[in-house]
Amino acid sequence: DEDLVTKHLASPGAVLRMHPLDGGQPMRSALALIRVSFLTAASYRLAMIISVFGLALQIVPTYYIGHTLNPYLAPAIKGQGGDLFGFMVVGTIAYLLLAAAVDSLPRALERGISTGTLELIFSTPSSVPSLLVGLTGYEILWATARSIVVLVAAVAFGFHVVWSNIPSAAVIL
């Protein structure tokens, strides 16, 4: 019923409550939007493959630059471990995750406007939080997967991970 949707969205605190038409499953529409984004990206398989391999290959020059400049810059990053290669790997991962977190919603809105699907998405009987999670979820998951690729490639080049510090690093990121 359209009047029910209009009343619900106009009421105070509507963003905090589950949408009555979500069927009690507010993340169902978010997962559907994430799935659509994944299927769209997966239809461009070559672009996905190039993106992943490009990130893995990026570690090669990073490794050599890090080891070439390490004698000069190690004193400056002594408090962060003193290894420039590791410092650059962590910076690359932080950049990938931060860029996805900051840029995913504007990019999703721009894509919806340019393709004409934004009005359709917002006219669905879904709560605003589930729409926001659905619009940004794929980009953040893809950035996480790319970060794992960078981490695995860096480990192959000798990057040492202090696993006990991962929870504190995750909180900071």
Image (tube, rainbow, N blue to C red):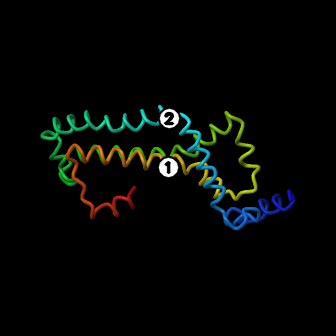
Which residue is outermost to the left? 71
Quickly name the residue at label 2.
Answer: 45
Q: Nearer the viewer, mark 2 or mark 1?
A: 2
Q: Amino acid at mark 2?
A: Arg
Name the foreground residue: 8 vs 52: 52
Left or right of residue 61: residue 29: right
Where is 164 relative to 114, above or below? below
Q: Quadrant of residue 117?
A: top right
Alpha carbon separation for disc pair 2 and 1 = 19 Å
Question: What residue would you read off at disc 1?
Answer: 140
Q: Is residue 52 above or below residue 167?
A: above
Q: Is residue 156 left or right of residue 128?
A: left
Q: Could you say where residue 31 lies in the image, as x and y percent from the top left? A: 60, 55
Could you tell me which residue is drawn at 76 percent across and 56 percent down? 125
Q: Position of residue 149 (x, y in %)?
A: 36, 45
| Residue located at (65% from left, 59% from top) | 28
Q: Residue at x 25, y 48 (%)?
A: 155
The reply, left or right, for residue 5 in relation to residue 132 is right
**Which quadrant holds residue 172?**
bottom left
Quarter of the image for the N terminus: give it: bottom right
Q: Disc 1 on helix, strand or loop?
A: helix
- Depicted 62 relative to depicted 152: above or below: above
Q: Identify the amino acid type marked 1.
A: Ile
Give left or right: position of 77 versus 5: left
- In front: 99, or 156? 156
Sequence-earlier tag: 2 or 1: 2
* Helix, strand or loop status at disc 2: helix
